[in-house]
Image (cartoon, rainbow, N blue to C red):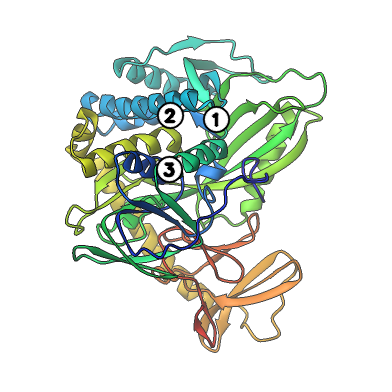
């Protein structure tokens, strides 16, 4: 699968691996957070290099639905259940700052985007009650929301909450513009460099798949932090969700607002303008990463819902994305523990990375250059509620239970041998010479890799939608050949009989 945004001829070409080995700041990850951070630091006169393990925008940013909205489903009422109104207001101010910076930047750079009304809708009485709670908290936090009983959707809606003046973007056009601007200010962007560790001495040694570099400051903008300091992987729940672009039937009327359901399963909808007319973008039907019996079934349910309400629409693209929700619901950002104040990070955007990601970049840059915003100070000094702490305990207890159950289950699976050839598009897990192994067949190619995640040894599961091996513990993902895709892992999978690839 490939997203609408990534299915194009990219104008970006990676810089060559630099001869220079020391930089003021090394940014790890070329998504929205990393690229905005790199631009702001380059503008300040710093020598900056961005290392991206895959390609620019390959992970969350290039697979988003591209909504830049302060109306975020049930996020604010969920935050209010754990925090004071002051903290919720700080979260809203952070997102306002991120949204305002990005919209102003796009206007200055002449990058097209569309201003839209954001709509959160309920299709059940229970959803309507939740929506009214969200409205109350939103107003208390300073958002000018209002109700509408005619959301303009082709199905029954109990109630709808609206916020005008929001925006939708083409995320890869945003990253293209940021890349040009970073280079114009002397920054370097190198794809295919997998950062594997960061030392603690000053200057910090940054170990990569292509050699070692040093930096005064390192920024981890990798979705889930690739360093285990602070154990943030135990405080984050990885979620996969699905998206599709459809070309509506000629003459059909597609609503122009940006929509999101407050009921489960989550359903998202917006349009995207093209030269041939608007496309319909739908999304949702998420689940914990690595734990769905069939991720493809979730995608099929999304497509079925879209075709039911927009008959005759033709699917042009399908894709999925991985986002991280903090157990206490608030994004983590700032200085990484045991990093002596020189390693900074951002994570836990909970599917709202376009505004949160830019806000975190603004905060990280302020930390590095001196100064800080009131909203960041408030968020940093919040106290985790008992509810948030309990959720962290539940998450990790469930993770430990899953690991034990999987290890027991694999021993009852059929043994893996050299002759194991799964059906096309499938993968199986079993023991090979007494060790967990994973075998898949994709486009006729049979591959065997270790079934133990290179992060903490979780037993991998097959993703029949993306044709990948996914870890159900902390969300690391790998290609059928065992190459790292995303998550907290820092190495490829081992190959049975050969060790690390």
Label 1 – label 2 distance at C-alpha: 10 Å
Label 1 Cα crowd, 10 Å radius (few <14 / some 14-19 / many 20+): many
The residue tagged with tag 3: helix, strand or loop?
Answer: helix
Image x and y of residue 202, in percent: 19, 63
Looking at the image, tell me whether mark 1 or mark 2 is earlier in sequence order: 2
Looking at the image, tell me whether mark 3 or mark 2 is earlier in sequence order: 2
Residues marked 1 and 3 touching at CB (< 8 Å): no
Q: Which mark is residue 377?
A: none
The residue tagged with tag 1: helix, strand or loop?
Answer: loop
Instruction: Report the side of 274 relative to 88 (left or right).
Output: right
- The one nearer the camera, 128 or 322, is 322
Label 3 – label 2 distance at C-alpha: 15 Å
Image x and y of residue 207, in percent: 35, 69
Q: Which mark is residue 182?
A: 3
Q: Residue at the location (67% across, 86% down)?
A: 418
Q: Is residue 9 above or below residue 408?
A: above
Disc 2: which residue:
102
Label 1 – label 3 distance at C-alpha: 20 Å
Quadrant in the picture for residue 252: top right
Q: Is residue 332 above or below residue 463?
A: above
């Amino acid at each position: 699968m490939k997203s609408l945004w990534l299915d194009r001829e990219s104008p970006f070409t990676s810089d060559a691996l630099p001869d220079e080995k020391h930089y003021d700041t090394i940014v790890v990850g070329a998504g929205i957070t990393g690229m905005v951070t790199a631009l702001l630091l380059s503008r300040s006169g710093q020598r900056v290099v961005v290392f991206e393990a895959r390609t620019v925008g390959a992970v969350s940013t290039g697979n988003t639905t591209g909504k830049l909205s302060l109306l975020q489903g049930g996020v604010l009422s969920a935050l209010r259940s754990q925090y004071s109104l002051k903290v919720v207001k700080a979260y809203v101010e952070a997102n306002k700052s991120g949204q305002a910076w990005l919209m102003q930047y796009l206007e200055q750079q002449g990058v097209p985007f569309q201003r839209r009304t954001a709509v959160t809708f309920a299709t059940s009485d229970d959803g309507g009650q939740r929506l009214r709670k969200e409205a109350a908290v939103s107003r208390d936090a300073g958002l000018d929301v209002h109700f509408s009983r005619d959301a303009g959707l082709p199905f029954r809606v109990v109630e709808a909450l609206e916020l005008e003046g929001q925006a939708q973007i083409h995320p890869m056009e945003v990253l293209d513009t940021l890349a040009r601007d970073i280079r114009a200010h002397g920054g370097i962007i190198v794809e295919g460099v997998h950062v594997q560790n960061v030392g603690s001495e000053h200057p910090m040694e940054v170990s990569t798949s292509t050699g070692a570099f040093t930096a005064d400051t390192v920024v981890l903008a990798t979705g889930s932090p690739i360093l285990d300091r602070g154990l943030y992987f135990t405080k984050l729940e990885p979620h996969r969700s699905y998206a599709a672009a459809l070309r509506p039937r000629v003459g059909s009327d597609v609503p122009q607002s940006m929509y999101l359901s407050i009921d489960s399963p989550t359903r998202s909808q917006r349009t995207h303008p093209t030269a041939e007319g608007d496309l319909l973008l739908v999304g949702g039907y998420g689940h914990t990463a690595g734990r769905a019996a069939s991720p493809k079934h979730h995608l099929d349910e999304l497509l079925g819902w879209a075709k039911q309400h927009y008959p005759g629409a033709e699917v042009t693209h399908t894709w999925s994305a991985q986002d991280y929700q903090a157990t206490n619901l608030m994004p983590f950002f700032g200085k990484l523990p045991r990093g002596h104040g020189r390693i900074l990070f951002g994570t836990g955007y909970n599917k709202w990375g376009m505004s949160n990601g830019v806000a975190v970049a603004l905060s990280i840059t302020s930390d590095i250059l001196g100064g800080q915003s009131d909203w960041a100070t408030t968020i940093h000094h919040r106290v985790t509620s008992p509810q948030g702490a309990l959720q962290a305990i539940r998450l990790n207890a469930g993770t430990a239970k899953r690991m034990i159950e999987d290890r027991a289950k694999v021993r009852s699976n059929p043994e893996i041998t050299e002759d194991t050839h799964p059906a096309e598009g499938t993968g199986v897990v079993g023991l090979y010479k007494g060790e967990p192994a994973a075998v898949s067949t994709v486009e006729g190619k049979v591959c065997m890799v270790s079934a133990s995640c290179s992060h903490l040894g979780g037993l991998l599961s097959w993703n029949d939608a993306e044709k990948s091996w996914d870890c159900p513990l902390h969300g690391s993902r790998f290609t059928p050949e065992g190459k790292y895709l995303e998550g907290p892992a820092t190495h490829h999978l081992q190959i049975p009989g050969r060790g690390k690839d």
